[in-house]
């Protein structure tokens, strides 16, 4: 609670006087606060750096894989064929003939205002001969469709309007479609229970009058080396033939009687880009550390030199040295500079894309092995410093956070001390004013008493 005591008796500006005294008293507390703010700034920068190093650890783990630089382009001479190259692929060229694409088995029933049997009992039979008996809730064509779909046999039933009958009633057909393409998805739907099917007395809805098989379920079929003695037929229940060649999948969307040329080739640009992106990721961290460790010198005499946020930080300095060593030391006696990775005398890491492309074209396996070795070392360093439990940067951040907590405790104690000191000063000056007021009252009283004393008077001549 504030107390206004300015100039009651003394005329002093005691509020300003106390403030000046408290500003002096608060200097240690303000220094602690500034240190806390600076430490929080360092923590923010260390956390950002740690996050970048963690990302580098993940990237280097991928880059150290045996196929990290394996990239291919896959093309086909017809839009009816799509080629995809994945893990394990190798350069490939071949011609294929697409005889047919995969089709889903589809059946339609005769048109009817309601299902002709009551109760509506049906038996669904798959291509393997397995049978499932279902009973619809009513003779409504919608209820029959729901019962077929819900049976879980891989058949979806759809109700389709089919006009009106002779009595003017709306009629419907059921379109029954296999959920999967290929011969394995073929099916039959019978009117009647399983016993009737077994006895041969049940009616196949596809062969009943008005019913039909719209599409016979069929596998996709293509031929390799068509017209030669080595011709080979390849089939698939779907329109994607997985592993037609090692690591190569082919998807067909239309038949093509003319041969379609497919080709899988090494993507040199993608390989060089992947290597360059990785090296640039390491370089960006090195540059970040360099900038954060550089002191700013004033342009004019008398100015203040500003230290970088990482200046004097031994952990960050050690991280930089370890990363630089990881990318520039030879791997099995081979210098990284042979594939375009080098550090100049100023410590700047660079990547020569042309040199890398030339090395990869001349000896792709050796280039991959050298690059993987570098990436593995970078992964080790990155993990050592950024691991969320044992990382050296992580420990550094925790140490700084503990320091901030300790500084906060000291500041809190100073706040209590300063509050007490200010209260003491206010009481002291208030007491001073009171004493001055009392002294002033006493002075006035004595003055009035002296003034009231009788005075001696001289006589007028003898």
Image (spheres, rainbow, N blue to C red):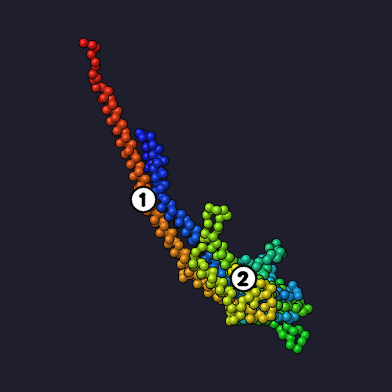
Front tag of 2 and 1: 2
Percent across and percent down for residue 395 are 46, 67
220, 384: nearer the viewer = 384
Q: Residue at x 35, y 33 (%)?
A: 9
Which residue is the extreme one toward the bottom?
A: 229
Q: Is 267 on the left-hand or right-hand side of 435?
A: right
168, 312: nearer the viewer = 312
Identify residue for label 1: 417
Percent across and percent down for residue 119 are 59, 70
Q: Is residue 444 visible?
A: yes
Q: Residue at x 51, y 69 (%)?
A: 318
Q: Secondary structure at mark 2?
A: loop
Q: Residue at x 70, y 77 (%)?
A: 265
Q: Is residue 432 above or below residue 175?
A: above
2 and 1 marks in contact (CB < 8 Å)? no
Marking on residue 344: 2
Q: Is residue 134 visible?
A: no
Q: Is 287 on the left-hand or right-hand side of 167?
A: left
280, 127: nearer the viewer = 280
Snapshot quadrant of residue 281: bottom right
Percent across and percent down for residue 408 are 41, 56
The numbered mark, 2 or 1, whose residue comes first in the sequence reads: 2
Percent across and percent down for residue 86 are 64, 76
Snapshot quadrant of residue 121: bottom right
215, 453: nearer the viewer = 453
Which residue is the extreme one toward the front?
A: 462
Marking on residue 430: none
Q: Secondary structure at mark 1?
A: helix
């Amino acid at each position: 609670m504030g107390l206004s005591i300015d100039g009651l008796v003394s005329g002093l500006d005691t509020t300003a006087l106390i403030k000046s005294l408290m500003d002096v008293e608060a200097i240690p507390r303000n220094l602690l606060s500034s240190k806390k703010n600076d430490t929080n700034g360092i923590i923010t920068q260390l956390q950002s750096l740690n996050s970048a190093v963690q990302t580098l650890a993940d990237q280097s783990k991928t880059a150290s894989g045996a196929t990290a630089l394996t990239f291919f382009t896959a093309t086909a001479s017809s839009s009816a064929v799509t080629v995809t190259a994945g893990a394990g692929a190798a350069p490939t060229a071949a011609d294929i003939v697409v005889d047919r694409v995969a089709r889903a088995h589809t059946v339609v029933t005769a048109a009817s205002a309601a299902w002709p049997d009551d109760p509506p009992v049906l038996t669904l039979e798959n291509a393997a001969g397995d049978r499932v008996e279902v009973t619809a809730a009513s003779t409504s064509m919608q209820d029959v469709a729901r019962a077929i779909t819900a049976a879980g046999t891989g058949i979806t039933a759809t109700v389709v309007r089919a006009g009106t009958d002779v009595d003017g009633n709306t009629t419907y057909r059921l379109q029954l479609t296999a959920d999967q393409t290929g011969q394995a998805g073929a099916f039959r739907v019978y009117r009647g229970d399983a016993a009737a099917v077994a006895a041969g007395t049940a009616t196949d809805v596809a062969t009943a009058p008005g019913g039909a098989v719209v599409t016979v379920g069929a596998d996709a079929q293509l031929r390799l080396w068509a017209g030669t003695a080595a011709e080979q037929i390849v089939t698939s229940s779907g329109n994607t033939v997985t592993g037609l060649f090692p690591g190569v999948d082919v998807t067909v969307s239309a038949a093509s009687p003319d041969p379609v040329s497919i080709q899988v080739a090494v993507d040199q640009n993608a390989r060089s880009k992947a290597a360059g992106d990785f090296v640039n990721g390491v370089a960006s961290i090195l540059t970040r550390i360099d900038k954060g460790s550089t002191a700013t010198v004033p342009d004019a005499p008398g100015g203040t030199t500003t230290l970088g946020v990482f200046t004097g930080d031994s952990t960050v300095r050690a991280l930089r040295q370890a990363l630089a060593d990881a990318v520039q030391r030879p791997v099995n006696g081979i210098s990284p500079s042979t594939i375009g990775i080098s550090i100049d005398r100023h410590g700047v890491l660079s990547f020569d894309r042309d040199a890398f492309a030339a090395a990869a074209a001349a000896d792709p396996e050796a280039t991959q092995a050298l690059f993987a070795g570098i990436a593995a070392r970078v992964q080790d360093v990155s993990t050592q410093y950024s691991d969320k439990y044992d990382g050296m940067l992580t420990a550094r951040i925790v140490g700084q956070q503990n320091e901030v907590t300790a500084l906060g405790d000291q500041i809190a104690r100073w706040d209590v001390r300063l509050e007490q000191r200010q209260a003491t000063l206010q009481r002291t000056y208030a007491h001073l004013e009171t004493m001055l007021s009392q002294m002033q009252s006493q002075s006035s009283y004595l003055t009035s008493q002296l003034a009231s004393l009788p005075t001696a008077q001289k006589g007028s001549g003898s």
